[in-house]
Amino acid sequence: MTFLGVTRSVRSKLLLAVLATTGCALLITAAAVAYYDIRRFRSNLLSDITAIADILGLAATPALEFDDPQAATDYLSFLRAKPGVIAAAIYAANGALFAKYVTDEEPLPDLPEGDGHRFGDGKLVLFKRIVAHNEILGTVYVQARYDLARRLVNYLAILGAVMLASLAVAAFIAHRLHRGITGPIASIVDIARHVLEKRDFSQRATKTSEDEIGVLVDAFNNMLDEVGDRTAVLERTQEELRTLNAELEQRVAARTMQLEAANKELESFSYSVSHDLRAPLRAIGGFAELLWTDHGADLNAEAQRKLGIIRSEAARMGALIDDLLTFSRLGRKALEPTELDMAALVDSVFARLRAEGDRDVELRVGQLPRAYGDRALLEQVWVNLLSNAVKFSSKREKPVVEVGAITEEHEYVYYVRDNGAGFDPRYKSKLFGVFQRIHDNADFPGTGVGLALVQRVVLRHGGRVWADGKPDEGATFYFTLPREVGDEGV
């Protein structure tokens, strides 16, 4: 029964392949012929109706010129000899119906359309202008039957008869061929089923011919040899992989704990160092200030210059420590996300910058979508980006800062653009590092921590930061925030 069952299955597939090939070839051929005939039918019908419209237009020209509707009606009555024409009409130049010919009370349009035609609802409708002496006298309207359905039914009937005869011949040929093909294949299938069910790779098929079936039997036996060897190797490899995966998971968990501990230790160290540096630095700055106040007049010019350097450097070091403390606190502070009006946030930040003396900068704010995040931290992002834009465009005659946003599928892209000093694109990678500066401090003072703060805040919100710019052509800084609540990496 197994052998017979397999034979019937392979036989059915062979028969199906032959019938499917024959049927597809016939269908493609019939579709191509039908498509060509339909196009030719449409073209011929349109050509005939266009010719009728031209003749009616020529015949109706004198009637329109002499306002003789009866003559035009007589011309239209000759359409009775064209049973395919359902309705026709002649319209005057002002759109009024001049003469008509209808069958079965076919309705006419109230006003003529422009020159053209359309196929639809089993009909061809055509409008054609009547022109004489470069003047439009009226319009010819013709409606004819477009009996495509009957034509397709005839094609289907012919196609059905041809397909039945062709499939019968194909089935007979397939029946004669299956005996020499399916028998040997059935034997191979029996052995393959035994191998799958018993996992016994010692079975081999018997070779009975030197044709392609014989080659198949040799290949099948060689495959069994190779599969048996590879199965043994694979089972050993899988066992080794399971052991390695277990060890890898343990290592990853241990390294993750070490990395978290190292990050916490680094944040704690940065905070402690920055905090402990403030006391001696405050003393240096304080005593330098006292020395300047109490004994500045007694010092010569060189001593005053050196004392001034001590005071300015102490102040700069204090700013560096403050920024470093702020940077280290970012890793400790828990985020408090809320919905934010980014436009209002930008306005308030820029108002504070103006109050601090940056009154000559022009701010241009585009549409800014609302965002979801920690208000204090994102406000700090805008403070750093806007203050940088104001600072680096301050030497322009007309400094301009532009703020806008781009809405992407999953995120908002906010940007701050200025027309200031710009930067060399080769140093892009240094922009967001702590204490990394690419401009001289004498030209544009700063600590080099602001952009590092921006990057850290944006990354904690699940976003990205980058910048574009060229020397003396301004710069644009971008950062993104997720559109949906819950997408941010807080």
Image (cartoon, rainbow, N blue to C red):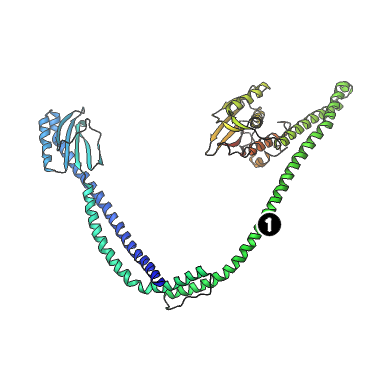
Furthest residue to the front?
Answer: 1
Which one is in front, 146 or 11? 11
136 or 286, nearer to the observer = 286
- In the rendered image, the vertical position of residue 387 relative to residue 215, given as above or below: above
Quadrant, the N terminus: bottom left
Q: Position of residue 222 (x, y in %)?
A: 51, 73
Q: Mark 1: which amino acid? A: Glu
Residue 125 position by quadrant: top left
Answer above or below: position of 438 versus 226: above
Residue 73 in picture, x, y percent from top left = 11, 33
When the figure is inspected, residue 4 is found, relative to residue 32, above or below; the finding is below
Q: Secondary structure at mark 1?
A: helix
Residue 251 in view here = yes
* Quarter of the figure that contains the C terminus: top right
Q: Is residue 131 visible?
A: no
Q: Residue 183, percent across and down?
A: 39, 74
Q: Describe residue 3's horizontal placement relative to residue 445 as left or right.
A: left
Q: Residue at x 22, y 50 (%)?
A: 151
- Horizontal side of residue 173 vs 331, given as left or right: left
In front here: 273 or 243? Answer: 243
Q: Quadrant of residue 370?
A: top right
Badge 1: residue crowd in 10 Å (few <14, some 14–19, many ≥20):
few
For label 1, the residue is 247
Q: How many marks?
A: 1
282 on left or right of 132: right
* Quadrant in the picture for residue 246: bottom right
Query: Residue 35: x percent and y percent?
Result: 28, 52
